[in-house]
Amino acid sequence: MIYLIGPMASGKSTVGKSLATVLSMNFYDTDALVVAEHGSIASIFAAHGEARFRDLEQQTLASVPQGVIATGGGAVLREENCKVLRTGTVVYLEMSEATAASRLKGDNSRPLLAGDAALTSWISLYRKRRAIYESLADVRISVDQKSVLQIVEEILPQLPAM
Ligand SMILES: Nc1ncnc2c1ncn2[C@@H]1O[C@H](COP(=O)(O)OP(=O)(O)O)[C@@H](O)[C@H]1O
Ligand SMILES: O=C(O)C1=C[C@@H](OP(=O)(O)O)[C@@H](O)[C@H](O)C1
Ligand SMILES: [Mg+2]
């Protein structure tokens, strides 16, 4: 299993999909699996709160089939999830604030960033989570100013033989 972790908009979903294609592995995105079964993340947060979303995220991560897995940026908040991540190869996509700003403009799919034009929430969440991302990472890649393909090509030689 290969797990992608990192802050919101670092490219876990996009890079994960491309990495899976290159490796001829299945790709799963825990957020997409939750949405397919329970509706949009925004609607889950609005109707039931973040804790409910975290429960669904945890259940999904624990039962996802073999492949390349894009996690949500907050999946590392639960130790149960970290235990699952440690069973595979963890690729951490790190990103600067400037890159986040350009990617998040006009995107309102992430309830934790609602009204976050100045990126205050993104910065504060990343500050709280950065140490966990670093502690879990087997492979660490800075995504700033790199194309998806460049990032995939940087990850490939750092993966253990499978
Ligand atoms: N290397 C990249 N260069 C430019 N844009 C990117 C890159 N990686 C991702 N993106 C774009 O940034 C946004 C966030 O990417 P996404 O894969 O959803 O991140 P995450 O899953 O980590 O939140 C998307 O619009 C995506 O197309
Ligand atoms: O960082 C977070 O807490 C979240 C990140 C999102 O996924 P991405 O990191 O793929 O945007 C999604 O799981 C949800 O909106 C919460
Ligand atoms: Mg994603």
Image (tube, rainbow, N blue to C red):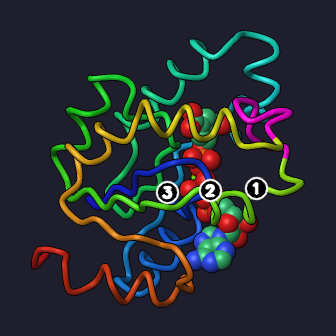
Looking at mark 2, is its residue's CB closer than 8 Å to ligand 1?
A: yes
Location of mark 2 (residue): 9
Instruction: Give the number of callouts.
Output: 3
Q: Residue at x 41, y 87 (%)?
A: 22
Q: Which mark is residue 104?
A: 1
Q: Amino acid at mark 2?
A: Ala
Q: Amino acid at mark 1?
A: Leu
Q: Earlier in the sequence, mark 1 or mark 2?
A: 2
Residue 115 % position (x, y): 86, 33
Q: Quadrant of the C terminus?
A: bottom left
Distance of mark 3 from mark 1, alpha carbons? Answer: 22 Å
Compared with 157, 48 (above or below) is: above
Looking at mark 1, is its residue's CB closer than 8 Å to ligand 1?
A: yes
Residue 35 visible to the viewer: yes
115 is within the stretch colored magenta: yes
Q: Left or right: where does residue 66 sit relative to residue 30?
A: left
Q: Quadrant of the N terminus?
A: bottom left
Q: Earlier in the sequence, mark 3 or mark 1?
A: 3
Q: Quadrant of residue 26?
A: bottom left
Distance of mark 1 from mark 2, alpha carbons? Answer: 7 Å
What is the magenta range? Answer: 108-116
Q: Residues within 10 Å of mark 3 (few under 14, many from 20)?
A: many
